[in-house]
Image (cartoon, rainbow, N blue to C red):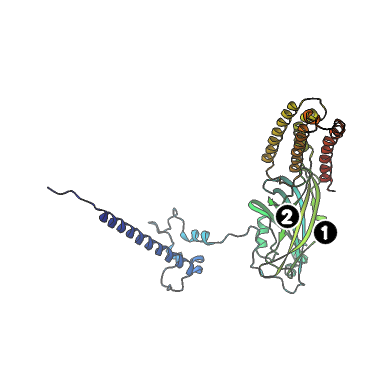
């Protein structure tokens, strides 16, 4: 009769250590293979980007990637059409993403020209569809125009039969890849879902006009302290990070200013357009060079009518009944305190509602200051209700002094509170 297996603690620990050792050895081997592959892939980038070029340690007799990638032939000696050549796939995977506007660095900088090269900038806003206070963004479509002069592009009008060459969309992208351009980019654009359609004009004297129709979402910093009487400045910032201020200078002459502006029919729900302005700034790059930047700002003034009703109407409704009970009605202390209790709860709920509806409003905003003043008015009114306006407390004091104070405070407190609200709102609305 065979004895049953008996496992002691030492046996179990030995088996456990053997399993861990085997797993660790397998992991180290796999990691070494991965590291070797990564080093090999980085050691010869030219061979990776160009499949037809042999590696430095590869003999000419060995087949290249292109030869090895040829598909097997069928019985008739022709390539098998059902399998695409690996050569084409390699080209697609190794070709870097091209800039859709042809903004490349391959064309040399113009020579024998006065430096810096003046690049005129004009911006015409066609539409603003949305302004988001929560995300500090706005959606817009506008035409952006750059113009500069490159003597190398001059041509004879007699030979060409025209004094201006025109290139649109795909043709403009292809032409831009063959000429020098200042490589100006919009720095605050959100590139996701952005649409940029280019157009290009080259004049006989070498003057170049690049027009971009841009439709995208842009980041901008909104100041909402004066909400709902705020005026916002929507930013479009343009910068050339390739060339410093000694090479190019973004300028605006009268022609550029005439080409800039807002569409006369531009309408934005809840906003009134105020115009467009430009500002030249200078930034310091990481290498110490200075870069020119031009900022276009579109002024938009909010129309506060609908928002004012949604703010002040419920605000005054929470205060009007307990105010009448306290200052203008001959009632006891208990009804007054009950009215103020309901008013405090209602104003707290209203404040919470607005904080959820407008989460981007800070403590310095006009709305927050109005709600804070409302809570202060409630506190003062409750204190007056339990002191001077309380008959049990008033009878312990000189009745003539109490009567004089009550008649004075009855109008001073509510009228003064209303005056503070109106003054603060007017100062914010007119920016005095």
Displayed quadrant of residue 421:
top right
How far apart are the alpha carbons under marks 2 and 1?
20 Å
Q: Secondary structure at mark 1?
A: helix
Residue drawn at (43%, 65%) of the image = 35
Displayed quadrant of residue 317:
top right
Residue drawn at (76%, 55%) of the image = 296
Residue 255's disc number = 1
Residue nearest the observer in this picture, 198 or 245: 245
- Circles 2, 1 touching at the beta carbon (< 8 Å): no
Residue nearest the observer in this picture, 271 or 266: 271
203 shown above or below 277? below
Q: Earlier in the sequence, mark 2 or mark 1?
A: 2
Closer to the eye: label 2 or 1: 2
Residue extending farthest left? 1
Residue drawn at (83%, 28%) of the image = 328
In the rendered picture of this protein, how many numbered marks are placed on residues?
2
Q: Give the x, y percent position of residue 345.
A: 69, 33
Q: Give the x, y percent position of residue 365.
A: 75, 45
Left or right of 413 in this view: 86: left
Q: Name the residue carrying label 2.
A: 236
Query: Badge 2 local density, few (<14 within 10 Å), some, or many (20+)?
Result: some
Residue extending farthest top? 331
Q: Give the x, y percent position of residue 253.
A: 82, 61
Whether residue 161 appears in this view of the structure is no
Q: Secondary structure at mark 2?
A: strand
Residue drawn at (51%, 69%) of the image = 46
Query: Badge 1 local density, few (<14 within 10 Å), some, or many (20+)?
Result: few
Whether residue 230 appears in this view of the structure is yes
Q: Give the x, y percent position of residue 118.
A: 77, 66
Left or right of 96 in this view: 327: right
Residue 176's disc number = none
Residue nearest the observer in this picture, 382 or 211: 382
């Amino acid at each position: 009769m065979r004895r049953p297996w008996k496992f002691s603690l030492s046996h179990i620990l030995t088996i456990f250590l053997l399993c861990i050792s085997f797993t660790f050895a397998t992991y180290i081997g796999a990691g070494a293979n991965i590291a070797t592959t990564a080093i090999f892939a980085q050691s010869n980038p030219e061979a990776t980007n160009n499949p037809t070029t042999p590696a430095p340690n590869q003999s000419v007799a060995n087949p290249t990637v292109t030869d090895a990638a040829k598909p097997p032939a069928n019985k008739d000696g022709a390539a098998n059409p059902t399998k695409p050549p690996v050569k084409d796939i390699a080209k697609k995977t190794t070709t870097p993403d091209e800039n859709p506007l042809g903004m490349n660095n391959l064309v040399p900088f113009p020579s024998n020209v006065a430096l810096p090269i003046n690049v005129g900038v004009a911006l015409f806003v066609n539409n603003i569809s949305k302004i988001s206070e929560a995300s500090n963004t706005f959606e817009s479509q506008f035409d952006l125009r750059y113009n500069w002069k490159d003597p190398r592009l001059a041509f004879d009008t007699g030979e060409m039969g025209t004094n201006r060459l025109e290139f649109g969309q795909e043709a403009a992208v292809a032409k831009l890849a063959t000429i020098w351009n200042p490589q100006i980019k919009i720095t605050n654009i959100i590139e996701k879902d952005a649409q940029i359609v280019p157009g290009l004009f080259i004049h006989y004297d070498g003057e170049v006009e690049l027009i971009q129709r841009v439709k995208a979402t842009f980041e901008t910093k909104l100041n909402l302290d004066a909400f709902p009487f705020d005026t916002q400045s929507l930013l479009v910032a343009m910068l050339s990070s390739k060339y410093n201020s000694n090479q190019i200078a973004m300028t605006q002459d009268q022609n550029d200013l005439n080409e800039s502006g807002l569409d006369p029919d531009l309408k934005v729900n809840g906003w009134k357009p105020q115009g467009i302005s430009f500002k030249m700034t200078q930034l310091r790059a990481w290498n110490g060079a200075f870069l020119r930047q031009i900022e276009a700002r579109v002024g938009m003034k909010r129309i506060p009518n609908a928002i004012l009703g949604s703010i002040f109407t419920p605000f005054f409704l929470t205060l009007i009944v307990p105010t009448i009970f306290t200052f203008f009605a001959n009632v006891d202390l208990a009804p007054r305190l009950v009215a103020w209790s309901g008013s405090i709860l209602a104003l707290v709920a209203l404040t919470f509602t607005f904080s959820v509806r407008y989460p981007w409003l800070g403590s310095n905003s006009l709305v927050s200051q109005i709600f804070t003043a409302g809570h202060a008015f409630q506190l003062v009114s409750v204190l007056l209700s339990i002191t001077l306006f309380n008959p049990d407390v008033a009878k312990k004091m000189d009745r003539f002094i109490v009567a004089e104070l009550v008649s004075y405070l009855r109008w001073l407190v509510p009228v003064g509170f209303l005056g503070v609200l109106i003054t603060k709102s007017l100062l914010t609305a007119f920016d005095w």
